[in-house]
Image (spheres, rainbow, N blue to C red):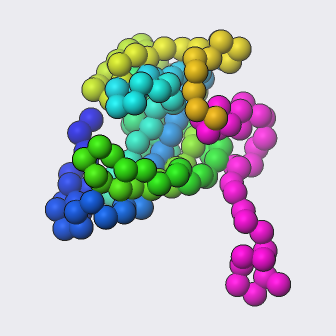
Amino acid sequence: MPTPEFITRLRSRIGHDMLWLATATAVVFDADGRVLLGRRADNGRWAPPGGIIDPAEQPADAAVREAFEETGVRAVPERLVAVTVAPPMTYPNGDRVQYLDLLFRCRATGGVARVNDSESVEVGWFALDALPTMTERVLGLLAQATSGTAAAWFAFAGTDDVPGGN
């Protein structure tokens, strides 16, 4: 999918300055326990489907929308797995961005896994013991999605960094 229109409008005003954007990621499992992954067109890395949350869109709805847009697979969210902040990045055109990512564990309900838009060059289901090469960050998120822990994971620097925490 192309850059969302609301971001294009923001960029016309702020140029390449840092944008803080919320994203939603879907870790989708099928009935056989395999995870849905796509190999990204922009960097060639394997990752779960996800993307920018549209204004006024619920994060879980965004995760499900992104899964379908990128892979053709319909899914329903089962639980929030993690709330994370990705490292800052700069795109080739100079746009700087940092993402707050909401990661949802989802269950596939239909559709056929396929490259469904221009964001992926390959899409497939993978057994957890036969995953393609992925970044440590993505592997950690997959581990959290399969941990069986009911609560969402998040980072916390500790009370020393909280005003009044001492």
Q: Position of residue 94 (x, y in %)?
A: 28, 52
Give left or right: position of 80 versus 111.
right
Residue at 23% in and 39% down: 2
**Rendered position, 72 above or below 106:** above
Q: Position of residue 123 (x, y in %)?
A: 43, 17
Task: Write down the quadrant of residue 130 in the picture.
Answer: top right
Residue at 65% in and 43% down: 81
- Can see residue 160? yes
- Can see residue 105? no
Give left or right: position of 1 versus 159.
left
Between 84 and 69, the one nearer to me in the picture? 84
What's drawn in magenta, residue-wise?
Answer: 137-166
Image quadrant holding the C terminus, namely bottom right
Q: Position of residue 39 (x, y in %)?
A: 44, 22
65 magenta-colored: no
Which residue sits furthest right?
166
Residue at 64% in and 47% down: 82
Residue at 29% in and 43% down: 92
Give left or right: position of 114 versus 137.
left
Between 61 and 146, the one nearer to me in the picture? 146
Image quadrant holding the N terminus, namely top left
158 magenta-colored: yes
Q: Position of residue 148 (x, y in %)?
A: 78, 35
Which residue sits furthest bottom?
164
